[in-house]
Amino acid sequence: MKEIRAEEYFSIGFELGKRNYWTIFFNFLIYAVLCVCAAITAVGILIVPAILVGFIKFLLKAARGEEVDVGDSLSAGFENGMWWKALLFSIIYIVGIALGLMLLIAPGLYLSTVWVLGIYLLVDKEMLPTEALGKSRELVHQLGFWKIFAVVIALTIATELTSIIPILGLFIIFLMPFIMMTYIAVYENAISNPSTTTNEA
């Protein structure tokens, strides 16, 4: 685990996103469309977490320099019991943060920060949902809570601008490869993977 300033994560994320920009971009669109289509029905919404697992798997492979292609890792969320793990993880994550936000907001902001690495641990290390969330909290505090909080808030504001100012939506969509890879940069540093946390800028 390297000592990285909050702003450095953005430049590392930019470098990682630049490597396979168009593959990441088109996969983001594919996975986004699949999630929207699945969420239309009550049954379909149950597979959205598994679809997201596939996207996370793809992002990790791209960041680590593995060969990736459009449509990569689509089935990853339905293998080795990952579907039910992803579903349970999502329920705990959403309910936990929602309850936290209702309790004077601060607890929700805290959980959304300390749990930010949970989905990556679930996918990459194949941890159980509660184990992944607990480990995420531990790693975030090791990295520096306020540092990661600043990164999460900045990226959240960037993505939420699409709903507040719709005209910015198209611009933000083209930034998504860099936004997604910034989260990956935080995760890779947390698990001490030097190959993807070196700022090549």
Image (cartoon, rainbow, N blue to C red):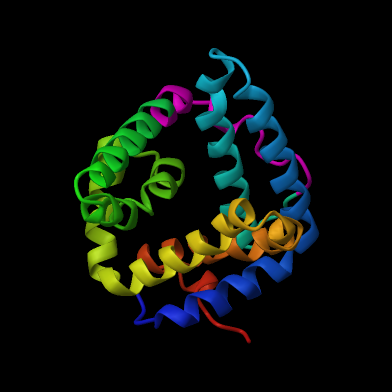
Left or right of residue 55, residue 105 in this image = left
Q: Quadrant of the C terminus?
A: bottom right
The relative height of residue 9 versus residue 102 in the rendered view (above or below) is below
Please state which of residues 17 and 75 is positioned toward the viewer in this rendering: 17
Which residue appears farthest toward the top when viewing the image? 43
**Where residue 19 sits: x, y (%)?**
72, 68
Left or right of residue 115, residue 19 in this image = right
Asked whether residue 15 is in view, the answer is: yes
The relative height of residue 201 versus residue 123 in the rendered view (above or below) is below
Please state which of residues 196 and 152 is positioned toward the viewer in this rendering: 152
**Where residue 103 sits: x, y (%)?**
19, 45
Q: Is residue 41 magenta?
A: no
The residue under the point 43% across, 69% down is 151
The relative height of residue 39 versus residue 128 in the rendered view (above or below) is above
The residue under the point 37% across, 62% down is 191
Quarter where residue 38 is shown: top right
**Where residue 59 sits: x, y (%)?**
60, 53
The residue under the point 25% across, 38% down is 99
The magenta stretch is: 69-86
Q: Quadrant of the N terminus?
A: bottom left
The residue under the point 50% across, 31% down is 49
The relative height of residue 140 versus residue 41 in the rendered view (above or below) is below
Q: Is residue 84 magenta?
A: yes
Please state which of residues 116 and 164 is positioned toward the viewer in this rendering: 164
Asked whether residue 128 is in view, the answer is: no
**Where residue 20 sits: x, y (%)?**
74, 62
Please state which of residues 147 and 172 is positioned toward the viewer in this rendering: 172
